[in-house]
């Protein structure tokens, strides 16, 4: 699933492409909205809230379009007449203005609600790592509220802090010297720095397409442990380990260095 900074860039791309313009193409390819026609509507703004995309559209009434990329989704911007880079059968929404279109492929969520219901769409989320209302103390309080929970699971729970995915979870645990299955209660000394670093990592990467947690943008040098299983640790040369962790049915791949991050 995309990280919060990836969704932030997708929102910025949509905002630049559509905001302030009137729709001349409105094509919703999901059953719930198959007959919906927003032609003539004006797109006001698109922004990210954690991993959720919020697009405000003014028509006969004020609407909010809520989309989520989930595992396979993406938004593309195409000049009029340009061939799509993904199959047409994967398109879920096409929003067109004069000269270009935005196409949402394989979106995990497509939802249109009246503007006054917008806040409820993301009310369950914790502090947004890239939001204007980022609150480090609130994020720490939410993480500490379940002291027995594995820190990896707690970081991935968007109700604690919004924006961390599998990659950042692995990288944050490594840079903090914490095993991803360690209970939150055992990480108290590192927790404030870990949360601060989460904010810093996403903020540094939000404006660039190439994500890096090491500070090195070269291929194969950008990450500490994520998807580097069996490769040597950049610090101690111990082979990186990988295993599925998490609640049954919601397991995620976790990566760590057995030496730098000893098991609890």
Image: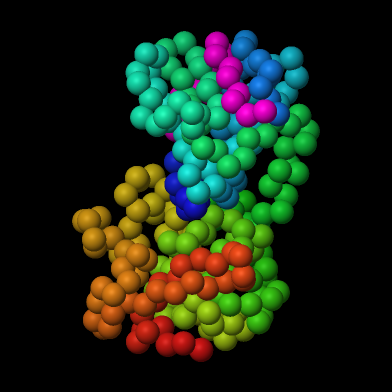
Q: Is residue 117 left or right of residue 161?
A: right
The residue under the point 42% across, 26% down is 77
As displayed, is residue 134 above or below residue 82?
below
Q: Which stretch is magenta? A: 13-31
- In percent of width and height, residue 61 lies at 75, 19
Residue at 39 percent of width and 54 percent of height: 204
Q: Is residue 234 left or right of residue 27?
A: left
- Specify the quadrant of the image occupied by residue 60: top right
- Asked if one can make out residue 78 in the rendered structure from this viewpoint, the answer is yes
Q: Residue furthest front?
A: 89
Residue 218 picture location, percent across and down? 21, 56
Q: Answer whether residue 89 is magenta in the image.
A: no
Counting from the top left corner in percent of width and height, residue 34 is at 66, 22
Give the number of callouts.
Answer: 0
Residue lying at the far right in this picture: please name it.
Answer: 116
Q: Which residue is at the front of the view, 133 or 97?
A: 97
Compared to residue 40, the image places residue 7 above or below, namely below
Is residue 174 in view from this perspective? no
Residue 230 occupies which quadrant of the picture?
A: bottom left
User: Residue at 67% of width from left, 34% of height from top?
Assistant: 111
Residue at 54% x, 82% y: name it.
182
For residue 119, above or below residue 191: above
Q: Is residue 203 above or below residue 30?
A: below
How far across and how far down the image is residue 242, in percent?
Answer: 40, 74
Residue lying furthest left: 218
Q: Report the coloring of the rendering.
A: rainbow
């Amino acid at each position: 699933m995309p990280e919060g900074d990836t969704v932030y860039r997708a929102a910025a791309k949509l905002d630049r492409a559509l905001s302030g313009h009137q729709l001349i193409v409105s094509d919703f390819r999901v059953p719930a909205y198959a007959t919906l026609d927003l032609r003539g509507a004006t797109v006001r703004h698109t922004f990210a809230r954690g991993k959720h995309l919020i697009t405000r559209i003014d028509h006969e009434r004020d609407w909010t379009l809520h989309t989520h990329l989930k595992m396979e989704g993406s938004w593309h911007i195409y000049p009029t007449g340009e061939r799509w880079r993904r199959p047409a059968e994967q398109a879920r929404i096409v929003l067109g203005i004069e000269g270009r279109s935005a196409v949402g492929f394989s979106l995990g969520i497509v939802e249109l609600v009246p503007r006054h219901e917008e806040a409820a769409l993301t009310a369950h989320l914790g502090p947004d790592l890239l939001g204007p209302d980022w609150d480090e103390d609130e994020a720490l309080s939410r993480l500490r509220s379940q002291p027995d929970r594995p820190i990896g699971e707690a970081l991935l729970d968007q109700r604690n802090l919004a924006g961390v995915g599998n990659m950042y979870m692995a990288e944050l645990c490594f840079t903090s010297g914490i095993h991803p299955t360690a209970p939150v209660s055992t990480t108290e000394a590192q927790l404030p720095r870990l949360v601060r670093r989460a904010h810093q990592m996403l903020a540094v990467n939000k404006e660039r397409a190439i994500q890096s947690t090491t500070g090195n943008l070269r291929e194969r040098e950008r990450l500490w442990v994520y998807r580097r299983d069996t490769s040597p640790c950049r610090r101690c040369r111990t082979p990186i380990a990988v295993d599925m962790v998490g609640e049954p049915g919601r397991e995620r791949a976790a990566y760590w260095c057995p030496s730098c991050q000893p098991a609890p």
